[in-house]
Image: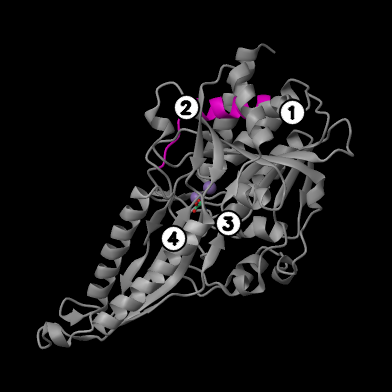
Amino acid sequence: MAEQLLRHGAYEYAKKVFDDIRAFSIDEPGVSRQGYGPKEQMVHDYMIEQAKQLDLEVFIDKCGNLFLTLPGEDRTLPALMTGSHGDSVPQGGHYDGLAGVVAAMTTMWWMRQVGHKPKRDITMLVTRMEESSWFGKAYVGSLAMVGQLEPIDLELKHRYRDETLREAIASLGFDPEAMVNGEPSVDLKKFCGFIELHIEQGPTLDSHEKERVGVVTGIRGNLRHKECHVWGETAHSGAVNKEYRHDAGMAMGEFLMSMEKHWEEWLEKGEDLVFTVGVMKTDPSSAIAIIPGHVQFSIDMRSLSMDTLARFHKLMEEEGARIGAKRGVKFEFDRTLVCEASGVDPDLMGHIAKTAERCEIPHIHMPSGAGHDAAVYENVGIPVAMIFVANQDGSHNWREKMKLEDFMLGTELLFKSIESYDD
Ligand code: HGY
Ligand code: MN
Ligand code: MN
């Protein structure tokens, strides 16, 4: 089948998959596919259906991660993996994670269309609960797969429901205890590499006319806190003068201003760092005429350097203590949730860059600000590489968009990189 016809076929195939999955994911104004929830399960069921039509082997590990394999000539060789996560943030964008899943499925479709018989198994991986937005922990399925999910993680509570991560996992029929016994769900030596296609989720690629594809050079790690508190004193907003107040709201404001000032100074010194307080709320009983005695908030700090994060985290705790003493309030930080930064495999990254040159796909090299499952695999010794595709209006919000033409450039690069892996 002529190249052009194939590309068109792949475009139509991918478009249908995106549209079919959007149809059952709608949660106006965006989409919601909670990890270990019914909609994420529907993505997995949909991909199993597609796999059967493409005569791929289906395997589901003890954590619910989905492995779909196109057998290679020599099945003793470690498999090359590609894929991403099927879950989304609440009322978020459709393409974060799903773009990598659809690109992997389209690559499998493409290989079947051209009758490509790979030297080694090519395995597509659909991971579980990559997003931290629902229970506070990111990469849950991938960490469990490599034996790094911890028992305490099962106690994490849903963002608004009275449900633990343990209960969510069990609700889909998987055994939570088996996921935290330290045992990987698969023999990790059976994989020679993992290539993840993902939307960039930032503005860089979309600001480029020509280069709409990114070859990723590293993945930021992060330190997160799900539920921190400022404990002050609730009081009458008229009867209590400033000198007597222990105002949790004002303390929170000073904390934010001082952390932002430190952040700017660290950036000027050349540190790679981002700092976000995404959740910040006073109590339901708060009101116009009440001095807030309590603020609950989250923390998300990221960097390509875990040392930078450790030092900035220490500074954050010191600022909390300083402002607390000054205002007679108490800053309380809950358990630190850690996602390690990672590099990418230089050979696999080089192979992708060379394939892009060979196929005349304009691209730039760039780091990933967002975290990805790929970081988990790189850190346990599975060589990883990532392909970014341009997208519009950022991500982790319902306005997230992606042009299918950009997606297809990245998918063609993925397909050609996999097709030529053993050349
Ligand atoms: O938070 C992240 O960077 C990823 O989208 N889970
Ligand atoms: Mn993602
Ligand atoms: Mn995400």
| Horizontal and vertical percent position of residue 174 | 71, 64
Residue 356 placement (x, y as % from top left): 59, 23
Q: Which residue is mark 1?
A: 421
> In the image, what residue type sits under mark 2?
Arg
Q: Earlier in the sequence, mark 2 or mark 4?
A: 2
Precedes in sequence: disc 1 or disc 2: 2
- Residue extent of the magenta highlight: 400-416
Label 2: which residue? 212
Give the colour scheme shown. one colour
Q: Earlier in the sequence, mark 2 or mark 3?
A: 2
At label 4, which amino acid type do we have?
A: Asp
Mark 2 C-beta closer than 8 Å to ligand 2:
no
Q: Residues within 10 Å of mark 1 (few under 14, many from 20)?
A: some
Is disc 4 placed on a helix, strand or loop? strand
The residue drawn where x is 84% and y is 32% is 72
**Which one is in front in this view, the residue at disc 2 or the one at disc 3?**
3
Mark identifier at residue 269: none
At 43% across and 32% down in the image, what residue appears? 205
Are there few (<14), some (14-19), or many (20+) residues within 10 Å of tag 4? some
Q: Which residue is mark 3?
A: 340
Which residue is the site of mark 4?
300
Report the number of numbered marks.
Answer: 4
Q: Residues within 10 Å of mark 3 (few under 14, many from 20)?
A: some
Callout 1 secondary element: loop
